[in-house]
Amino acid sequence: MGKNKLTKFAETYTFPNFVQPTREEVISQGFSLKGNWHTFFKNDHPIVLELGCGRGEYTTGMAKMFPNKNFIGIDRKGARMWKGGKAAIEENMNNVAFLRAQIDMLNYYFDTDEIAEIWITFPDPQPKKVNKRMTCRKYLNLYSSFLKAEGTVNLKTDSQMLYDFTMETLQSLQYNIRQNVTDIYALPSVPEILNIQTYYEKMWLEQGYRIQYIQFMLHG
């Protein structure tokens, strides 16, 4: 890790909107906010997760649009999330948090029916590792352990392979596909929430990639 990244990572420990227990602590002692995230936000508003949030552009973008919802950006690299955490503090956004955690351990951090919605924005498509794709059966089962029955999962991706894989998986499991857009920016009017552009999305668009979107439910 470079010096600048180390500095940013260290600074995140001073951020009131960052939560980053160690893996060992969570496994051996449990996680105090599991089932109690509303005590962190000090309200009972719905909680939305962004998985693999990177710099946090989507997390903070959604939080600005929906002040009556709480948003948690999740990534395993604290220095990467520094930008979003810093921006949220500077803009007094009290409905934003960032959790440093591994996606495959989310059931340690969130309880049954605790989450209202999930966003997965431009994940690594993992072309050679099916079980690491964030819309594979393993992860869908994981999300269902804490997503509300009426909750939705949203995928934005530039990867045709991941889009096709996700559609095939959802159809084989007979999950409810609520929206299926093969080119967001070909729509007559792009919904505001889909028009948030991350650093990587802007890069893919400049290279001519189509941005695809799927919204689905995990409970039929």
Image (cartoon, rainbow, N blue to C red):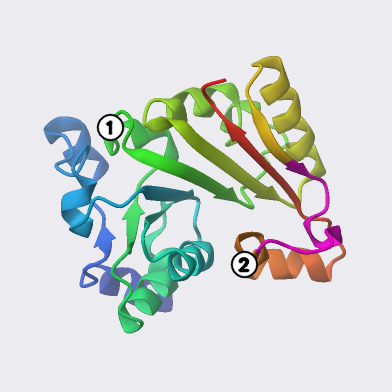
Q: Is residue 216 toward the left or the right of residue 119 in the image? A: right
Q: Quadrant of the N terminus?
A: bottom left
The label number, if any, that marks residue 111 in the structure image: 1
User: Please, what is the three-letter code of the amino acid marked with disc 1?
Assistant: Asp
Could you classify mark 1 by the number of other residues whose Cα lies within 10 Å: few (under 14), some (14-19), or many (20 or more)?
some
The label number, if any, that marks residue 196 in the structure image: 2
Is residue 188 part of the magenta span, yes or no? Answer: yes
User: Please, what is the three-letter code of the amino acid marked with disc 2?
Assistant: Ile
Which image quadrant is residue 135 in? Answer: top right
Q: Position of residue 150 (x, y in %)?
A: 47, 32
Vertical order, 200 against 76 (above or below): below
Farthest bottom residue in view: 90
Q: Quadrant of the C terminus?
A: top right
Is residue 197 part of the magenta span, yes or no? Answer: no
Vertical order, 74 against 66 (above or below): above
Q: For numbered disc 1, what is the local secondary structure?
A: loop
Q: Residue at x 35, y 46 (%)?
A: 101
Q: Residue at x 73, y 69 (%)?
A: 203
The label number, if any, that marks residue 166 in the structure image: none
Report if residue 2 is visible in the image: no
Toward the viewer: 197 or 131? 197
Q: Residue at x 18, y 58 (%)?
A: 42
Q: Position of residue 162 (x, y in %)?
A: 73, 38
Q: Which residues are magenta?
A: 180-191
Q: Residue at x 30, y 37 (%)?
A: 110
Q: Is residue 181 toward the left or the right of residue 120 in the image? A: right
Vertical order, 43 against 14 (above or below): above
- Of callouts 1 and 2, the N-terminal one: 1
Could you classify mark 2 by the number of other residues whose Cα lies within 10 Å: few (under 14), some (14-19), or many (20 or more)?
some
